[in-house]
Image (spheres, rainbow, N blue to C red):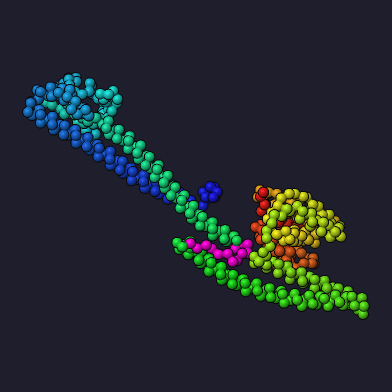
């Protein structure tokens, strides 16, 4: 699937929303765990400091305050607890014993705890947190805990939680993409089938899987609707076909009798002209019925001629030669601009469509004008363009001009049944193309647009 097309799908947009909600939820959860973990570690360090203070106070109670300096020096030398931070100041504020050489700068919080930064034994700056004990003789004792362990745990948590969040977002996006691709594939199948049905293949049906999910229920409802439409269309088509067949037969017999009257030596010349006029009308009626039946077969998908590669340039030359004499009778210059390119389809139908466009252009062009006939190439498509200098078709009527029996309001008394462009439209749709009607200022530019046949 085209990645740009996937990005524009509603399912992919939902995947982005899902990833955003999932990421926000994960971020809140990770943040809560992160803050709770750090808070718990801080409380544990505070508890260690308080336990250390109680231990010192208990031991001083046994030894006496005079042994405080010796006791601090003993704790500093023993290195029993490397994370302990101890510093004793004399009444003048000079360090006399402890694990750090000087009093660290810091500040007290609202609970009386002293937060500071100091240089640890390994020479690395580290945070510390503890309490300051003041004695009656003016000495001060700092009992604190090295916070390097919390800092290291915090760094590890940052890396772990960042990696976890990134992986969670990637997994959420991957899951969203998988769901999006799955849904898009199902929708593409329905769209492809719909396009085939729109080209006239009413026998096609939406696929239904054994899962019987909401897409299958939608497909089943569409299939039931298509069955009903197909039944109604078949009924209308059968009536139209029967009428066309039933009327074509007596018209053919009537034409045969009129031809016999024309060649009859007993008929007067005036009557002969009237019969010729009737013959022309009969021919027009038969042509109308043939066009109707051909359009019906194409739209019904019963035109089952095998598709082959058809070069368009020879078709344009054949049509140009066929209508050259017709154009000369009206003093119209028929200009052909050749090109190259092939399409897959039915050569006879394509020639019929091109001939209809030329016939319309010559029919509605004034004498002495020019009809331009060209094959142009654009990415993925070939365009057969026929541009005339006639009255054109008003912009508001161009869409309806492709309907059966519709004649533009400015068509005047020009002969025709209004089926020419309808047949071109049916042939274009049969080949996966379209018909474009544009302004030629003045006149009309009619284009038969067909998908190019790639080598």
Q: Name which residue lies at 61% across and 64% down.
A: 201
Main structural element of the magenta stretch: helix, strand or loop? loop
Residue 54 vs 356, above or below: the answer is: above
Residue 12 vs 217, above or below: the answer is: above
Residue closest to the eye, 129 or 134:
129
Residue lying farthest bottom? 266
Q: Name which residue lies at 92% across and 76% down.
A: 269
Left or right position of 351 against 104: right
Q: Is residue 81 visible?
A: yes
Left or right position of 15 against 157: right
> Magenta span has 205?
yes
Residue closest to the eye, 135 or 262:
262
Locate residue 444: give its quadrant.
bottom right
Q: Is residue 10 visible?
A: no
Q: Name which residue lies at 70% across and 69% down.
A: 293
> Magenta span has 294?
no
Q: Which percent across, then down, holds residue 156?
A: 32, 35
Q: Name which residue lies at 50% across and 63% down.
A: 208
Q: Which residues are magenta?
A: 197-209
Locate residue 36: give its quadrant.
top left
């Amino acid at each position: 699937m085209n990645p740009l097309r996937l990005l524009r799908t509603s399912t992919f947009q939902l995947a982005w929303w899902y990833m955003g909600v999932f990421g926000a939820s994960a971020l809140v959860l990770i943040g809560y765990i992160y803050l709770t973990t750090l808070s718990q570690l801080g409380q544990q360090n505070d508890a260690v400091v308080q336990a250390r203070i109680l231990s010192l106070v208990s031991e001083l109670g046994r030894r006496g305050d005079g042994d405080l300096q010796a006791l601090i020096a003993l704790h500093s030398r023993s290195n029993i607890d490397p994370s302990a931070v101890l510093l004793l100041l004399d009444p003048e504020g000079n360090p006399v014993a402890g694990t750090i050489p000087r009093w660290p700068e810091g500040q007290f919080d609202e609970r009386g705890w002293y937060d500071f930064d100091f240089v640890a034994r390994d020479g690395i700056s580290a945070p510390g947190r503890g309490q300051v004990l003041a004695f009656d003789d003016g000495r001060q004792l700092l009992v604190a805990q090295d916070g390097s362990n919390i800092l290291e745990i915090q760094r590890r948590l940052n890396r772990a939680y960042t990696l976890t969040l990134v992986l969670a977002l990637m997994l959420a996006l991957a899951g969203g993409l998988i769901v999006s691709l799955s849904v898009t594939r199902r929708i593409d199948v329905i769209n492809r089938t719909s396009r085939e049905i729109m080209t006239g293949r009413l026998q096609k049906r939406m696929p239904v899987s054994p899962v019987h999910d909401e897409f299958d229920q939608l497909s089943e409802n569409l299939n039931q609707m298509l069955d009903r439409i197909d039944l109604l269309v078949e009924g209308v088509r059968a009536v139209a076909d029967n009428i066309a067949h039933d009327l074509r037969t007596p018209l053919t017999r009537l034409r045969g009798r009129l031809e016999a009257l024309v060649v009859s030596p007993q008929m007067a010349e005036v009557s002969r002209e009237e019969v010729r006029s009737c013959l022309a009308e009969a021919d027009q009626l038969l042509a109308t019925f043939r066009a109707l039946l051909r359009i019906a077969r194409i739209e019904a998908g019963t035109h089952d001629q095998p598709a082959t590669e058809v070069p368009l340039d020879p078709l344009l030359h054949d049509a140009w030669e066929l209508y050259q004499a017709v154009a000369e009778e009206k003093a119209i210059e028929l200009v052909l601009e050749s090109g190259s390119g092939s399409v897959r389809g039915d050569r006879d139908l394509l020639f019929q469509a091109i001939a209809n466009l030329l016939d319309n252009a010559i029919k509605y062009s004034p004498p002495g004008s020019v009809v331009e006939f060209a094959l142009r190439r654009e990415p993925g498509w070939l365009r057969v363009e026929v541009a005339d200098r006639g009255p054109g078709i008003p912009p508001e009527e161009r869409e309806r001009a492709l309907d059966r029996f519709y004649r533009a309001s400015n068509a005047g008394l020009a002969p025709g049944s209004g089926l020419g462009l309808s047949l071109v439209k049916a042939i274009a749709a049969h080949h996966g193309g379209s018909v474009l009607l544009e302004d030629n200022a003045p006149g009309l530019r009619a284009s038969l647009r067909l998908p190019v046949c790639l080598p």
